[in-house]
């Protein structure tokens, strides 16, 4: 453990350092980071071993095998086949814990044969755009990496980066970096912008309201690394917000920068939710409407029981925290009645009414309401979902790998299904060629042909329609490109009457086969 704490601990950092002491500061920062890195990984292994051993139920020698119900059977499970569960029962009345070991009767399952790899895909009911635009440059996993006949290294050359390396925020690293920041901030007088200037970490301390090391840290439970709980070094100023009223005023200016709550759910967070007016609900009740309802006053101090003309114009005894709490609630739920606000804010009900009247203007509510009723668009019309029973099943009996078969009679013109896949621009499909060549299967369906064309690929994502095989002369299904609410979608439709158990075929077209379709 490094000994930062020998130096004096100042709660607030000094101004920026002079340029000439930067190299020294740089070195300090690296030293702190490196030492903490070492400490963390020295500690983590033991922690993981402990955490994992807590999960095993066979830490104790299992008791003698209990008798099983199926005693007549010649099958008797061995110790290894029986699963034991340790049950700890806590009696809330006596405070005693009783422990027992239960044995689960083994289930004799038929032997499952593993489905051939890569023969299926993630099931989806809608086309999924392969967003973002450069998605084709990023590989999500390495296919066939354990297949010697596939040159996966050559395949990787088609990509610029690995998804898991870039989009992954390593929680271990985050913990180490936060602790490094804490030491640099309190023990070595770095400001957050000093730390950012060092470029030690991938993320800035506070990138924006929902970015940066501090923000990410509020979004998860951190590992209980003892170094993070050393009392002599205070926590980073995230925790000051609620405990210190003076600081609250200072911090409030900067509130969108970070949120003190571990369970912040962005949209509802009083800091982050309020930073985005677009998502906040609008009041639909005026103060006057509320005032006109005199029924059921909540208390003697209810706004309903006091004549509005006798109400004071302002609330005089309010602290900054009171305004903050009131605003947070009213922003998220502007139609909350003063009676309910009084319970939440722990203030007299009439004061809630006064504050609401200051915060929400009646004419704005009326104006918003007027706009809404004036602009009333006809309600959306939902097209009825096609009543659709499964018309096909998959069968490996097909000549061409798996195939789709009718499970009941299908009439000419009936919808068989929608061809579903990942939506791509055809110019971004090059990387699929190696895979198609290796597997001998190509699941690309052209939506728009040509240089700026688009395709659906159901290699990784799709539905049963991906199993329809090709036939040039005996296709019983056809594809129709439909424009549905502005999107191109592909309907597969029965061309002729099809009997149950018949295989479904589609003519993929000559282009699919490079001008040379196979013979039927
Ligand atoms: C859209 S998939 C059809 C389902 C595929 N049979 C499977 O097992 O996943 C298209 C692939 O099936 C095979 N296929 C389909 N029809 C074929 C045919 N008439 N002759 C040869 N291969 C065919 C080819 O490998 C083709 O690339």
Image (cartoon, rainbow, N blue to C red):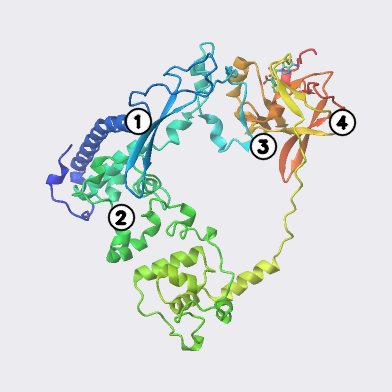
Residue contact between numbered discs 4 and 2, judged by CB atoms under 8 Å = no
Q: Position of residue 161 (x, y in %)?
A: 47, 29
Ligand 1 lies under 8 Å from the Cβ of mark 4? no
**Mark closest to the chain's N terminus, 4 or 2:** 2
Q: Nearer the viewer, mark 4 or mark 1?
A: 1
Q: In which quarter of the image is the C terminus?
A: top right
Indicate the quadrant of ligand 1 in the picture: top right
Q: Could you say which is closer to the camera, residue 192 or residue 241?
A: 241
In percent of the image, x 51 and y 65: which residue is there?
A: 333
Task: Please say if 272 is above or below 448.
Answer: below
CA distance separating discs 3 and 2: 45 Å
Q: Which of marks 1 and 3 is in front?
A: 1
Q: Name the residue under label 4.
A: 412
Q: Could you say which is closer to the camera, residue 172 or residue 97?
A: 97
Q: Mark 3 points at which residue?
A: 125
Q: Name the residue under label 1.
A: 52
CA distance separating discs 4 and 1: 59 Å
Under circle 4, the secondary element is loop
Find the residue positioned furthest to the top: 149
Instruction: Answer left or right for 386 relative to 104.
Output: right
Under circle 2, the secondary element is loop
CA distance separating discs 1 and 3: 38 Å
Q: Quadrant of the N terminus?
A: top left
**Mark closest to the chain's N terminus, 4 or 3:** 3
**Mark closest to the chain's N terminus, 1 or 2:** 1
Under circle 1, the secondary element is helix
CA distance separating discs 1 and 2: 31 Å
């Amino acid at each position: 453990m490094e000994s930062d704490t020998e130096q004096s601990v100042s709660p607030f950092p000094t101004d920026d350092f002079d340029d000439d002491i930067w190299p020294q500061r740089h070195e300090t920062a690296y030293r702190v980071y490196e030492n903490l890195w070492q400490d963390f990984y020295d500690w983590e292994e033991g922690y993981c071993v402990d955490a994992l051993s807590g999960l095993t139920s066979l830490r104790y020698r299992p008791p003698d095998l209990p008798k099983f119900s199926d005693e007549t059977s010649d099958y008797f499970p061995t110790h290894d086949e029986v699963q034991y569960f340790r049950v700890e029962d806590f009696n809330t009345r006596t405070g005693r814990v009783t422990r027992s070991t239960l044995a689960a009767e083994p289930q004799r399952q038929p032997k499952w044969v593993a489905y051939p790899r890569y023969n299926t895909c993630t099931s989806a009911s809608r086309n999924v755009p392969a967003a973002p635009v450069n998605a084709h440059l990023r590989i999500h996993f390495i296919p066939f990496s354990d297949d010697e006949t596939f040159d996966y290294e050559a395949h990787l050359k088609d990509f610029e980066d690995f998804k898991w390396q870039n989009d992954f925020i390593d929680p271990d690293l985050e913990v180490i970096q936060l602790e490094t920041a804490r030491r640099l901030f309190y023990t070595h007088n770095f400001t957050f912008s000093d730390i950012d200037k060092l470029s030690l970490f991938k993320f800035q301390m506070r990138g924006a309201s929902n970015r940066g090391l501090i923000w990410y840290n509020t979004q998860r439970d951190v590992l209980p690394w003892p170094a993070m709980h050393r009392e002599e070094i205070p926590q980073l100023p995230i925790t000051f917000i609620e405990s210190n009223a003076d600081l609250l005023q200072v911090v409030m200016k900067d509130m969108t920068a970070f949120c003190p709550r571990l369970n912040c759910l962005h949209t509802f967070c009083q800091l982050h939710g309020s930073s985005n007016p677009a998502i906040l609900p609008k009041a639909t009740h005026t103060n006057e409407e509320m005032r006109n309802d005199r029924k059921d006053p909540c208390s003697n101090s209810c706004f309903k029981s006091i004549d509005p003309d006798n109400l004071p114009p302002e609330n005089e005894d309010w602290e900054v925290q009171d305004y903050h709490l009131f605003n947070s609630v009213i922003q998220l739920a502007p139609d909350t009645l003063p009676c309910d606000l009084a319970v939440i804010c722990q203030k007299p009900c009439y004061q809630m009414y006064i504050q609401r009247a200051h915060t929400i203007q009646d004419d704005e509510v009326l104006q918003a309401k007027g706009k809404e009723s004036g602009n009333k668009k006809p309600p959306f019309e939902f097209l009825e979902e096609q009543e659709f029973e499964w018309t096909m099943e998959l069968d490996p009996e097909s000549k061409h790998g798996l195939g789709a078969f009718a499970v009941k009679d299908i009439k000419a013109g009936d919808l068989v299904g929608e061809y579903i896949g990942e939506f791509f621009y055809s110019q971004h499909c090059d990387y699929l060629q190696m895979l198609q060549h290796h597997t001998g299967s190509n699941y690309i369906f052209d939506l728009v042909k040509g240089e700026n064309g688009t395709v659906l690929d159901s290699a990784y994502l799709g539905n049963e329609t991906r199993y329809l095989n090709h036939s040039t002369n005996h296709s019983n299904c056809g594809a129709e490109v439909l424009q549905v609410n502005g999107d191109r979608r592909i309907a597969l439709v029965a061309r002729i009457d099809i009997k149950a158990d018949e295989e479904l075929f589609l003519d993929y077209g000559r282009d699919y086969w490079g001008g040379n379709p196979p013979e039927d």
